[in-house]
Image (spheres, helix red, strand yellow):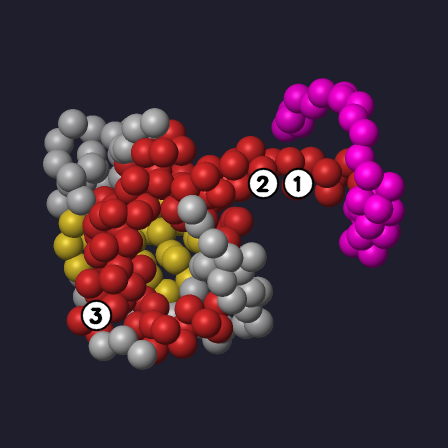
Amino acid sequence: MQGRKTTTRAFRIDDTVDRQLRELAEREGVTVSFLANKALRRLVEWDMYADRFGFTAMPKEALSRMIGLLSEDEVRELGRWAGEDVYRAFTTFMFKHLDLETVLQVIPKLASRYTRAFEYEEKRDGSRTVIVLRHGSGHKYSLFYEEVARALFADLGGRGIRTEPQENAVVLEFSNAPKTAANEGVSVESKRGLPSTEKPAGPRNVPT
């Protein structure tokens, strides 16, 4: 497989930053170039948008505590609001338009990679696609992410998008997953009986 095309670029950095990069690279067993590229990729793929949009960092434990104080109905209402008024707007802000493809890039992949709010898994089997958002934070978090997903996918192109909250994960099933956004409306429903994806939750990284 052909690797990604690279460009050589020279620029100045503070001595302190250089020393810390070299120390970190040695501890992690990677090159300074790898760390610098990783940091720059995060900047252009996430931080430059998240900062301008007003995202703030909060420890996962604090978020879990706040979610735990809400009733299930309040959690669902919060998820619907976040999906409709925050994440749809953020997706449009990043990509200048909102469709199924951009939603599937912003929330499951970029949000999973850079905020570490959940782990993203995708399985394709013919015309069926199953996406799992594994958060490890309990039932109420599953309700929250289910409502976020349902609000995000509403009125977007696609066919038969179904959701199921589990104890530590949310399953999204596309009965006929399109490669690009279609013109027809999306059918979003909550489905019980999707295969369980539960497994013991491992150590969690605190989002930054």
Total residue callouts: 3
Residue at image location 85% in from the left, 52% down from the top: 23
Residue at image location 30% in from the left, 40% down from the top: 89
Q: Nearer the viewer, residue 64 or 55?
A: 55
* Image position of 47 (left or right of 143): right
Question: Which residues are the magenta region?
Answer: 1-30
Q: Nearer the viewer, residue 195 or 63?
A: 63
Which image quadrant for residue 148?
Answer: bottom left
- Residue 128 percent location from the top left of the image: 28, 45
Check disc 3 and report its element: helix, strand or loop: helix
Q: Amino acid at mark 2?
A: Arg
Picture disc at residue 74:
3
Residue density around tag 1, few if under 14, some if 14–19, many if 20 or more, within 10 Å: few
Q: Amino acid at mark 1?
A: Lys
Q: Which residue is mark 1?
A: 38
Residue density around tag 3, few if under 14, some if 14–19, many if 20 or more, within 10 Å: some
Quarter of the image that includes the N terminus = top right
